[in-house]
């Protein structure tokens, strides 16, 4: 994609006039969401076929990710909008003469229209999925404060930019979004223009906090860490706690130096190995923050993952880092399987967690860690009260 502010504002007006977000909401009543947070592909494709001709074209292109005939596109999209879509390279002409996005969708979320990658689960994916968006994006967005008036915000692992843009829309004076993948940085900049929030939001390519400048401080921090279980180094860790999200630990090392005296924030971490309803990852992150004078609390939710699904994802990461399947990679995953099986005390599954921190208030009990959320069903709490 290319950034061209006037073209992106033409596209914004067109989507607003077409009531794109409203039509999307109506479709969502009919189509179940997959665990990824996206509508299930086939039911979505079918329901889009029931829309009027113009919306069929829009939703086939930007919600399903399909290629659409030239004549249908020209009948549905006014010429100047089609030019704008070409200008920013959001629509491309294929050799067949059909139009298609470069494996990007436009997803309405929390009052924004966001350009994101076609998810890996959709058969319309044609390029690597680099602008990540999933259920965790909605979860973290919903946890943001209602007002950030006049505050400086840091969004680490910003992806499509959803949280950065919401913080700007809620009054932040300046927002810095940090993202590893250059492609996602570009898309997040396009999203800032598409939602008319570019004046107060800045996206930087950054590995964890590497692009934060010396002396920069922030009042509010949000970090939706990658969803995947990973290993920091390519070796079997000493304990199950080593299978997790290394980005979080890298961030926590440098973050306190960039927090203002009134700072608070949210860290999302996914699929952490759990024992008796809690995780070592939560304890370790809380201890690190408490040492710096922050109180912490957490929203803890049981993840639907199993040992097998986590090992499968881990295998994918290891293969990617090794450049393909290798005997060493297979051995590594076997080693992690043995760790899971031999864990003492036995692990009781995986947990998704939002960790909230704020500068300790003088009246708050030091080190209090309220933990709330929906517990797993047990015979006691699901028994009929009748
Ligand atoms: C779960 S996604 C969150 C994206 C976005 N904040 C959202 O909620 O939709 C995690 C993001 O972290 C990025 N990422 C992965 N490793 C990173 C790193 N070391 N530093 C910065 N970003 C990273 C990924 O590319 C991905 O966009």
Image (tube, grey):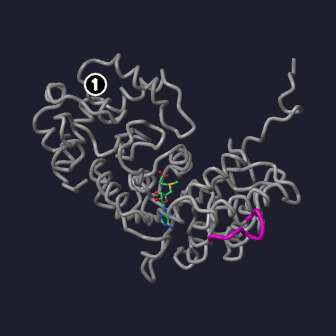
| Residue identified by numbered label 1 | 55
When asked about the image quadrant of residue 203, the answer is: bottom left
Q: Position of residue 302 (x, y in %)?
A: 72, 45
Q: Give the residue displayed 31% in from the left and 59% down from the top.
A: 186
Q: Give the residue displayed 25% in from the left and 38% down from the top.
A: 100
When asked about the image quadrant of residue 164, the answer is: bottom left
Q: Which residues are magenta?
A: 234-241
Q: Position of residue 111 (x, y in %)?
A: 40, 40
Q: Give the residue displayed 31% in from the left and 47% down from the top.
A: 195
As drawn, the residue found furthest toward the bottom would be: 214
Q: Is residue 30 left or right of residue 367?
A: left
Circle 1 Cα neighbour tier, 10 Å, few/some/many (<14 / 14–19 / ≥20) = many
Helix, strand, or loop for circle 1? helix
- 50 or 143: nearer the viewer: 50
Q: Is residue 8 left or right of residue 318?
A: left
- Magenta region, main secondary structure: loop
Say if disc 1 is inside 8 Å of ligand 1: no
Q: Is residue 312 magenta?
A: no
């Amino acid at each position: 994609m290319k950034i061209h502010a006037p073209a992106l504002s033409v596209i914004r007006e067109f989507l607003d006039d077409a009531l794109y977000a409203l039509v999307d909401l109506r479709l969502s009543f009919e189509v179940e969401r997959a665990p990824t947070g996206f509508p299930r592909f086939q039911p979505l494709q079918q329901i889009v076929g029931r829309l009027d001709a113009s919306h069929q074209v829009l939703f086939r292109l930007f919600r399903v990710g399909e290629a659409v005939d030239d004549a249908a596109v020209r009948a549905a999209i006014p010429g100047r909008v089609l030019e704008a879509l070409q200008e920013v390279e959001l629509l491309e002409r294929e050799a067949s003469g059909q139009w298609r996005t470069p494996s990007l969708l436009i997803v309405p979320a929390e009052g924004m229209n966001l350009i994101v990658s076609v998810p890996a689960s959709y058969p319309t994916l044609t390029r690597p999925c680099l602008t990540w968006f999933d259920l965790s994006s909605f979860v973290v967005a919903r946890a943001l404060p209602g007002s950030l008036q006049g505050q400086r915000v840091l969004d680490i692992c910003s992806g499509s930019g959803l949280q950065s843009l919401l913080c700007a829309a809620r009054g932040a004076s300046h927002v810095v979004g940090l993202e590893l993948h250059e492609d996602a940085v570009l898309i997040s900049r396009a999203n800032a223009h598409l939602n008319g929030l570019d004046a107060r939001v800045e996206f930087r390519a950054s590995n964890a906090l590497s692009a934060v400048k010396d002396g920069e401080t922030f009042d509010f921090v949000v970090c939706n860490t990658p969803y995947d279980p990973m290993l920091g180094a390519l070796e079997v860790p000493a304990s199950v706690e080593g299978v997790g999200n290394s980005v979080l630990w890298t961030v926590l090392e440098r973050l306190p130096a960039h927090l203002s005296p009134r700072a608070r924030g949210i860290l999302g971490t996914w699929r952490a190995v759990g024992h008796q309803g809690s995780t070592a990852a939560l304890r370790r992150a809380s201890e690190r923050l408490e040492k710096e004078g922050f109180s912490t609390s957490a929203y803890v939710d049981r993840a639907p993952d199993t040992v097998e699904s986590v090992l499968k994802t881990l295998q994918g990461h290891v293969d990617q880092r090794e450049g393909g399947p290798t005997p060493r990679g297979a051995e590594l995953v076997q080693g992690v399987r043995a760790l899971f099986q031999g864990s003492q005390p036995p692990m009781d599954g995986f947990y998704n967690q939002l960790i909230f921190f704020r500068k300790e208030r003088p009246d708050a009990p030091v080190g209090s860690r309220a933990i709330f959320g929906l517990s797993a069903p047990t015979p006691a709490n699901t028994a009929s009260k009748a």
